[in-house]
Image: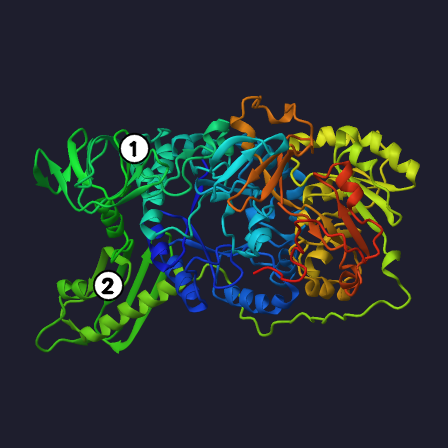
């Protein structure tokens, strides 16, 4: 059976060592720039070079993340960085931006490239589309199940990587803009503020509260160790552990456990289900566990509405409280020791806890207590009888895990042969188990001893002086002529030289040439001025809308194109638009799984549409293969720089709705140097998240079958209300997937002159949760002079940009 790669996170060098010594085949890490975990410690250039050499010598690969969107002004800095990574033998790059993917593929054709999960690749056409860029591997969306992953592999032959453990995003990666919209910290730029981990009220129609405030979209942590057989048999190439923000002892625990589980199954087809391993994994960090979408976890086991942070392991229920002494009594479900950390899940909803300073059993202080013992401990805070106590930190376990990588190294076994003959040079040859070898010969010519000839014991002792390296001789053959004499310093020098040669051989994985010159890309500054002879009212307007009722409520003189989303009523929309003289495009969802394509294509082939607004790269490919109509890339493809525009143009796209995370200056940059039709959204509640999970799951009328959901698509009857009383509307698309909108509409209808300064080809108005009355109040004459502003609105990123 083909061996699968175990890929571990490395937030810093200590985390890298923890991964290495506990059995990782490869690590992924980020530099100081262009990484989706900007708040991790990360690696500077010198540390990356050291990490690669250190890892390669010990047989571990190193992948570096460039999994953010880049602006044109950053491209030259990126090229310098990629050249550095290339020259320093990094094994592969993990990339999000399709423009960056194309650029690096062209400039560094032998650099192995992986597509990040941030690229939202989740279907066969999408993966077929990126094959032309020489991609070796795709990290598929976490929302795919193992059968869907197998189907993609069978269809494409692409090497696939999946997450098997750690934190989960509630939204499809690359499609989550809520942090960006709320506070300007973009997940697509590596700065997510994790608003999904906050508490919300779940609202129904007319903002009626359906569920009390809770963590309705805070995902549990993925844990697949009990099902590792299904993943191995699924043909996946690489198993990825999440956690670049986690501590090294966490990495050590998770890597060690999965290494053992994988090896046991590959060798004996047996599964690992020991309680000790389960407890260790849970103890180092968990938000409760789910087996995730990949293993089709029940919907009620996807999120943890109680708590968004580490839960720990359950210790027991409070049996008795002495509030005067801040003391509680409980019967232990797990061992407990002084120095451990605990937390009480209190009836008041406020968690309290801290470090254990004393443990008392029958009025006697002890250092530790075992399972089933009844103990008294001090807990400061309002804890009551019946509250649940959890152990959030195990001091002994943490120390044991730290000992696996602190001041320890893996061992590389060597064999060697040394030949020492009188009147000849000394010859030393060493080799490892993989067949790598190094030869060293002395300049010194061996002499006949006058007093004390060399002995085998002394030669062996000096050859075995390998301190400071991971090498150890398991066998040395010594050919020593009787009476031969040579300085020990000469033998030591041969040893050092041979070890250095072998280290260089093992450290260099790729035969790459030094780069003599980086060809820098020209950058054109934007020109802010009104186009001569072109009035703002002459720019055509596109309408994004998803329901017939809303469509029929629109009457605007500059509209000539409609992007319509509900496939089920598209025929009615076509009839209406043709009557108005408007072109109508089908707006595809940003998530279309393989199973959905037959349904969509079968419907579309009987309808006369004028084009397709493609929500993902897969639909671009599908549309090019199936139809002979214009295809426009939606902003959900994250067109963020001129290279992404050029790449999409090369794939056959005729226009783009530009990324909603760009400011006007950056949009101006693109319009000044791209021939593609660029469309700018000037009104609408923008899509903040796309969820496979549905927050309505625990509402009484949920049928737990999203593709048969009885709720009308795009009806926006529900919402999430945050602590600032902002409501994020929720709806289903026609495939049953959950859409979460931003709480406020983007409103630029009074700032159209500012928009016009960058000279866009088209403007776009997006209608989502507005009823007929609200639609009538939207100033769609596109004159840019309105003073009738909404009560609550946002300018988006047009003036502030993103971090």
Q: Secondary structure at mark 2?
A: loop
Q: Is residue 13 left or right of residue 82?
A: left
Which residue is at the front of the view, 382 or 87? 382
Q: Is residue 334 left or right of residue 756?
A: left
Q: Residues within 10 Å of mark 1 (few under 14, many from 20)?
A: some
Tell me the CA gap for discs 2 and 1.
53 Å
Q: Which residue is mark 1?
A: 388
Visible residue check, residue 433: no
From the viewer's perspective, is the residue at label 2 or at label 1 nearer? 1
Q: Position of residue 13 (x, y in %)?
A: 36, 59
Quadrant assignment for the N terminus: top left
Q: Which residue is mark 2?
A: 466
Examine the rendered structure and indicate whether residue 548 appears above or below residue 126: above
Which residue is at the front of the view, 11 or 627? 11
Q: Position of residue 298 (x, y in %)?
A: 48, 26
| Label number found at residue 228 | none
Visible residue check, residue 443: yes
Q: Position of residue 403 (x, y in %)?
A: 24, 51
Q: Position of residue 385 (x, y in %)?
A: 25, 30
């Amino acid at each position: 059976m083909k061996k699968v790669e175990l890929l571990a996170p490395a937030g810093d060098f200590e985390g890298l060592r923890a991964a290495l010594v506990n059995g990782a085949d490869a690590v992924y890490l980020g530099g100081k720039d262009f990484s989706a975990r900007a708040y991790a410690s990360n690696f500077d250039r010198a540390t990356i070079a050291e990490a690669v050499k250190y890892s390669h010598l010990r047989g571990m690969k190193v992948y570096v993340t460039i999994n953010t969107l880049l602006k044109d002004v950053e491209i030259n800095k990126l090229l310098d960085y990629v050249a550095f990574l290339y020259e320093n033998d990094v094994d592969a790059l993990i990339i999000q931006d399709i423009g960056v993917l194309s650029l690096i593929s062209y400039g560094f054709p032998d650099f192995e490239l992986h597509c990040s999960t941030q690229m939202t690749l989740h279907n066969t056409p999408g993966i077929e589309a990126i094959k032309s860029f020489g991609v070796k591997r795709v990290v598929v969306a976490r929302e795919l199940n193992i059968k869907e992953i197998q189907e993609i592999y069978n269809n494409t032959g692409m090497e696939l990587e999946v997450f098997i453990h750690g934190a989960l995003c509630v939204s499809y990666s690359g499609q989550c803009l809520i942090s960006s919209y709320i506070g300007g910290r973009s997940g697509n730029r590596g700065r997510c503020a994790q608003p999904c981990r906050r508490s919300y009220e779940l609202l129904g129609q007319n903002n009626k509260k359906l569920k009390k405030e809770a963590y309705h979209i805070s995902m549990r942590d993925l844990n697949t160790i009990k099902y590792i057989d299904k993943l191995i048999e699924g043909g996946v190439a690489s198993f990825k552990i999440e956690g670049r923000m986690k501590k090294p002892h966490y990495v050590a625990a998770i890597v060690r456990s999965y290494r053992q589980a994988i090896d046991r199954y590959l060798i004996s087809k047996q599964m690992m289900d020991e309680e000790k391993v389960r407890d260790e994994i849970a103890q180092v960090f968990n938000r409760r566990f789910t087996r995730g979408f990949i293993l089709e976890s029940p919907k009620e086991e996807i999120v943890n509405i109680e708590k968004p942070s580490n839960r720990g392991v359950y210790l027991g229920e409070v049996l008795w409280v002495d509030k005067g002494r801040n003391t509680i009594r409980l019967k232990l479900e797990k061992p407990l020791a002084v120095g451990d950390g605990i937390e009480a899940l209190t009836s008041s909803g406020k968690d309290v806890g801290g470090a254990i300073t004393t443990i008392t059993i029958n009025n006697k202080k002890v250092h530790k207590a075992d399972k089933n013992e009844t103990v008294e401990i001090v807990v400061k805070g309002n804890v009551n009888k019946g509250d649940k106590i959890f152990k959030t930190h195990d001091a002994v376990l943490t120390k044991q895990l730290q000992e696996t990588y602190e001041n320890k190294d893996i061992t590389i076994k060597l064999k060697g042969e040394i030949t020492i003959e009188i009147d000849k040079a000394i010859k030393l040859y060493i080799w490892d188990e993989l067949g790598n070898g190094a030869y060293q010969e002395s300049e010194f010519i061996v002499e006949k001893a006058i007093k004390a000839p060399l002995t085998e014991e002394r030669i062996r002792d000096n050859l075995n002086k390998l301190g400071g390296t991971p090498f150890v001789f398991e066998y040395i053959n010594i050919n020593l002529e009787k009476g031969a004499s040579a300085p020990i310093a000469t033998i030591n020098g041969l040893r050092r030289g041979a070890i250095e040669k072998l280290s260089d051989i093992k450290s260099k994985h790729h035969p790459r040439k030094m780069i003599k010159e980086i060809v820098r890309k020209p950058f054109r500054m934007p020109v802010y001025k009104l186009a001569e002879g072109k009035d703002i009212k002459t720019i055509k307007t596109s309408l994004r809308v998803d329901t017939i009722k809303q469509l029929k409520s629109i009457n605007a003189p500059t509209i000539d194109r409609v992007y319509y989303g509900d496939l089920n009523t598209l025929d009615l929309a076509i009839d209406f638009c043709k009557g108005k003289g408007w072109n109508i495009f089908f707006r595809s969802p940003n998530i279309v799984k393989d199973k959905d394509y037959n349904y969509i294509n079968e419907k579309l082939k009987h309808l006369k549409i004028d084009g397709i607004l493609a929500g993902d790269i897969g639909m671009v490919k599908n549309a090019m293969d199936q139809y002979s109509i214009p295809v426009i890339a939606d902003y959900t493809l994250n067109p963020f720089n001129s290279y992404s525009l050029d790449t999409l143009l090369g794939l056959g796209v005729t226009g783009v709705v530009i990324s909603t995370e760009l400011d006007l200056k950056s949009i101006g940059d693109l319009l000044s140097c791209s021939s593609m039709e660029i469309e700018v959204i000037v009104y609408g509640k923008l899509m903040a998240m796309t969820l496979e999970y549905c927050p309505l799951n625990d509402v009484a009328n949920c049928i737990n079958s999203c593709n048969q959901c009885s709720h009308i698509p795009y009806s926006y009857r529900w919402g999430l209300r945050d602590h600032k009383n902002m409501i994020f509307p929720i709806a289903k698309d026609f495939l049953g997937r959950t859409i979460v909108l931003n709480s406020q509409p983007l409103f630029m209808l009074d700032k159209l002159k500012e928009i016009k300064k960058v000279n866009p080809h088209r403007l776009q108005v997006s209608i989502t949760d507005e009823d007929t009355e609200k639609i009538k109040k939207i100033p769609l004459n596109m004159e840019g002079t309105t003073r009738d502003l909404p009560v609550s609105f946002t300018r988006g990123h047009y003036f502030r940009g993103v971090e």
